[in-house]
Structure formats: C-alpha cells, structure tokens
Image: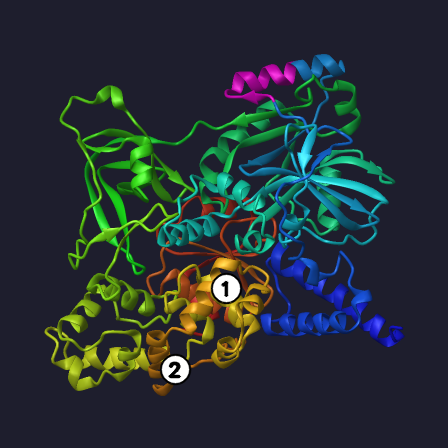
Amino acid sequence: MVPEDVREEAEKLKKELRHHSYLYYVLDKPEISDYEFDHMYRKLVDIEAKYPELVTPDSPTQRVGGKATDDFQKVRFRKPMLSLANAFSADELRDFDRRVKEGLETDHVQYITELKIDGLSMNLIYKNGVLTQGLTRGDGRVGEDVTSNVKTIHTIPLYIENAPPYMEVRGEVYMPRKSFIMLNEERDEAGLMPFANCRNAAAGSLRQLDPHVTAARNLAFFAYALGDIEGLEISSQEELLMKLSEFHFQVNPNYKKWDSIEGVIQGVNDWEVRRHDLGYDTDGMVIKVNDFAQQEKLGATVKDPRWAMAYKYPPEEAETKVEKIVVTLGRTGVLTPSADLEPVHLAGTVVKRATLHNMDFIKEKDIREGDYVKIYKAGEIIPEIDRVLKEKRNGSEKPFEIPEVCPVCGSPVGRPAGEVAYRCTNPNCGGIVREKLVHFASRDAMNIEGMGPSVVDSLLAYRLVSDPGDFYRLTQDELEQIERMGEKRAGNLIAAIEKSKESGLAKLLFGLGIRFLGAKGAELVAGKYHTMEELENAGTDDIQSIDGIGKATAESLYSYLHDMENMKVLDKLKSAGVMMEAAVEEETGSAFEGEMVVLTGKLSSMGRREARDLIKSQGGSVQSSITNHTTLVVAGEDAGSKLDKAREKGIPVLSEEEFLARLGRA
C-alpha cells in the first residue's frame, strides 16, 4: 500500500515539474534554477523507485524510456493528414482567394497566415489528457508509431489538464538551427556523415531505435492543427491556436489574421527576408481560411484542402567558383576538407569558404577544384555546396584526393571501419594536441580570455605546454619570455587562467574534448553528477540513463575517464585547483527581472555572449528572435530587421548606453 501522503506528494511533484518544464521549454521564462528543478525531479524518481505503482505514462520521469525495437508499427489515422497545394506567386494567391470566395459565395473571408516550419509532420493522440501515441505523417493515411521518441521532446506535454476525452494534436517536429550546427560539428568530429539540413536531421532523429539518442538531439515541436477530436468545440483557426497555447503546447507566435488577400500577400513578402533572423528553418507561409464552418463548406480534394494554400519561397542560393580544396585537422584527428571560394554575397553575408565534410561528400557531388557550384546556407548559417554546374566545365578542373599523410605530423592517414572520416593515426600528433588545447581554452569551454590559437602556438613552440593541465602551471616569467608577450599581457593571461578554474564541471567536461560529448551533453552530465568523483564512479549504464545521453556518448565518456593518460591530466587539473564540481549559478541582481530580451546589432563595450550572460544574471531571459512574448530589445550599431520589427510592434528599445545604465555601468 502507498501511504496517502506519499501519493499526494508524488502528484504535487508531477504537477510542479510539468509547470516548470512549460515555463522553461515553451515560454523560455524559467522561475526556478536548474538545480531546484533537478532536486524536485530526483525526489520524484526516488518516490517512484520505492513505489513503482505510482509511475504513470504522463510522469515527467518517463520522457526517455521504452525499449529499442527493430521496426516502427504502422497505424492508420482516423482522419487523414492531407498535404497542401503550393503557390509561388502573388497571382496564384489571388487565384486561391477567388476560388475560396466563389466556393463560399461571399466576399467576406478572413485568412490566417502561419510560418511554414521546415520539419516533420506529427500527429499526437491524447486520451483523457495523457499522451498515448505519436505518429509520423507517413503517406497521410498511415503513419509510423514513434511514441517513445516523441516523449523525449520537451515542448510536447505528456499530460494536458482539462483536456477533452480524445484529441489529436497535429504540428511540426523541427530541429533548431543552433542544435543542427552543434550536431553536425559532433558528427564531423566522430567521422559520421553530416545531415544536409535541419529537416533531415529532425527526421533522422525521430526514427532512432534508441530514444536516448533522440533526446540528445534537442528537437522541438510547434502545434497548429487538430485531427480527430471528441468533446471540444472550436470555431476558428485563431481560436484553435489560442486553445493549443492554453493546453501548454508551443505555438509559433508569428501568426496573423487578415481581412484581404492583399494583406496576406504583404505579410508573405515581409517574411521572405525576416525569416532568416529566426532560430529555425522555414520555407514558406501557410494561408488558411480562418472560420471552421467555411473550411467545412469548402471541403477538400483527394490530396489537399480547398481552404488552405502553402506559399513557397524560392531557395536562396548563389553561384561561385571553387578555387581550392584545403584540409584542416580537428582535435580528434579528423581531416576535414573545405572549399575556398570566389567571394560571393549570400543571405546577407560575403561567403568565401564552404565546408565539404568528408571525402564521401566530395565524391557524391563530384566536386573538383575549378568547378562552378551553387551554394546555400544550411540552417541559414553554414555555407554548403548544393550542386556542381558540370555544364560549365572546360577540362581544367582537378579532382581532389585526401592526403595519404597528415598535413601536420606526416603520419599515415587512415579511415576507421564504419566511418566516413579520415584520421591522423598518430595520437601524439602536434596538430591534434594544438586543436585540443585551443578547444580547452575556447569561450564555450574553459573561456581562458587571451588564450587564442596564436598564443597556444607560441606556448607549444616554447615547449611550455603539452596538455590542458600545463596551462595551470604557467608562470609570469615563462610567459614574459615569449616574443611580443610583455609583462602586462602575461599578467592578464595568468589572471584569466586563474579565473577559469571556477568554470565548473560542465565547462571542464566539454573542454576536455571527449568524443561525442558536446556542450549540451556536458551540461546534462554535470546536472546529474555534481562532482567529478561521482562521475568517475558511475558506470556506462548509469551515464546512459541521463535524459539526452546516448550509448555512444556514455561509452566514450566512461572510456575517457578511465584511460591512464587522461587520468594523469585530470590529476594535474585537480592539483592546480580547477573546480571539479558543478558550478552554482547565482542571481546577482534583478535589473532585467521578468524581461524577455532580444539583442540586435553590435555592442562596442562587450560581446554578444557577455551581454546575454549579464541579462540572465539579472533575472532576464534572452531570445534569438522577436516574438509576441518579447518585452525589450537592446540595439547596438548596425541593428537590422529586428529593430524595425520591434518598433513596428511597439516594443521598448534600449540603446547601448541605456542598457549599460540599467546594469549600473558607466
């Protein structure tokens, strides 16, 4: 028997954890620290471990669970998931408007426009408020059951309060651009083929047989439609979007109601440029008749509804020439080819180089030095070659082959079985050592200010360092002997090294350059194991039980911590006084308490990262783009479309001087 007070406490913890997850993942407005959330979560885990009968499918502890299967079960939808007809011009939208009005026999039609998210369509089934199934779109009539993986997505609620008896919520699973870039960087380092775009990455992540792998991919979900439903009456798309928000789904805030198709066209044109500032990929706008009664009257064809249309933006790409293919060495020994390009303007920036990932990528696209190519920006950020313009070849183009020896140490290059990457076979390669040291000191790792690549090169040339532990043995006298270092610069560097000791366990783990362990994974590990000693005593199964950590990462981390050479480095770091515990975040003020802030333009007094950290330390949250939740914009020099949008929406804007004044800085 479960004591009543224990049952009540478990229910209370579940409710509080759901609430704080919603604030953190959907609204980006947390009210408690990660430490407090983790404490509550562990308390619930302990209760459920003691009383297994209290474990329910909607418990926050069940986000990652289930067993890997050999296949995904096929499930037929109650109501089909139809596709949308496409429009590519304003005239085609006007034709759509004409057909709608003729079908309704009225000129009074309101439309809703929504951004078309470039992801994977999903149908979520809730019974009495509990998420019971997550189905991919499939062919529109039969989808695949990926429930175990869907449960790992924090913006999808496992339980909905005051929900109808049966409800199907439809929307788009997507991968944020930041997560996409980090994932491909990790795949490059691991010798795996990168994903071509955010959509492919989201689709590949959802079809993983191990939910822990999916959890590590940081997917998200925008809700925008209903499938079959019982016990709930809704009269319009606008009302539906508001209701989905009430149910704690993440709804894209950039929807708008229009009274005319000309307004719709204006909105479509505005977003063609503004969409590049978002933190996720979009490839168009969806236009829907707002009124559900009118939608029902218009009906649908076999393939698509007559009351909706997708306007597709043309792909933004540019033509340029591959001048040369060069190879760089990464910290794990991977040789990564890149293309030096004739400079070309693309999506607001001048592009001079594009990543080529690996030899398989080059061979698949048949990229040669001297080729004319079409390039685009993967995730709107990383320049990629889409295709070679082979019709422009004149015979002077040169095929590329990976070097047979390492460009740094001259050791043989090998390609491990099952990998697409070529690696230097020398574990003591000077190039690998250099890249590991540069990474350890980098901003996202231990953040040793002033310890850039050129300084690391000097330290290696003077034989002052060979591993990260040596940073903390450097003296002022040793640094001053380096050419062009000087007393003041050496003193600043010693101070920065000393300051980095307090970075905390997550930064340290990431800085060590452990294969498969990215910055987010390091934070997850440090969230469970608050000290290095706890982590060193954990087994691979324990590490893998962390929500968001997969088998390969767990095994790699365990192997690293139990390797004799790595243990020597860790001992050096411990002896030097480097913090081996999770850093405790302290609120230092309330100057931005409750504010949802967007930074735009360049600040002369500090970098973007420092400004973001200061806002968070003063109780605020920082967004990547302006939404309906944005309360404040900080604008530096050369602020662009975000500033225009803020003024348009009437959102308060601070200049850099006003921002510093609020922080109490002159």
What are the residue bounds of the magenta stretch? Answer: 85-98
The mark total stands at 2
Q: Is residue 273 above or below residue 31?
A: above
The prevailing secondary structure element of the residues shown in magenta is helix
Q: Earlier in the sequence, mark 2 or mark 1?
A: 1
Q: Is residue 105 magenta?
A: no
Q: Nearer the viewer, residue 666 or 50?
A: 50
Amino acid tagged 1? Ala
Residue 571 appears in the picture as rendered: yes
Q: Secondary structure at mark 2?
A: loop
Residue 443 percent location from the top left of the image: 36, 66
Residue 398 percent location from the top left of the image: 16, 32
Q: Which mark is residue 554?
A: 1
Q: Secondary structure at mark 1?
A: helix
Q: Which mark is residue 628?
A: none
Which of the 4 image quarters holds residue 319? top left
Q: Is residue 363 left or right of residue 480?
A: right
Which residue corresponds to mark 2? 578
Which of the 4 image quarters holds residue 225? top right
Q: Residue at x 43, y 64 (%)?
A: 611
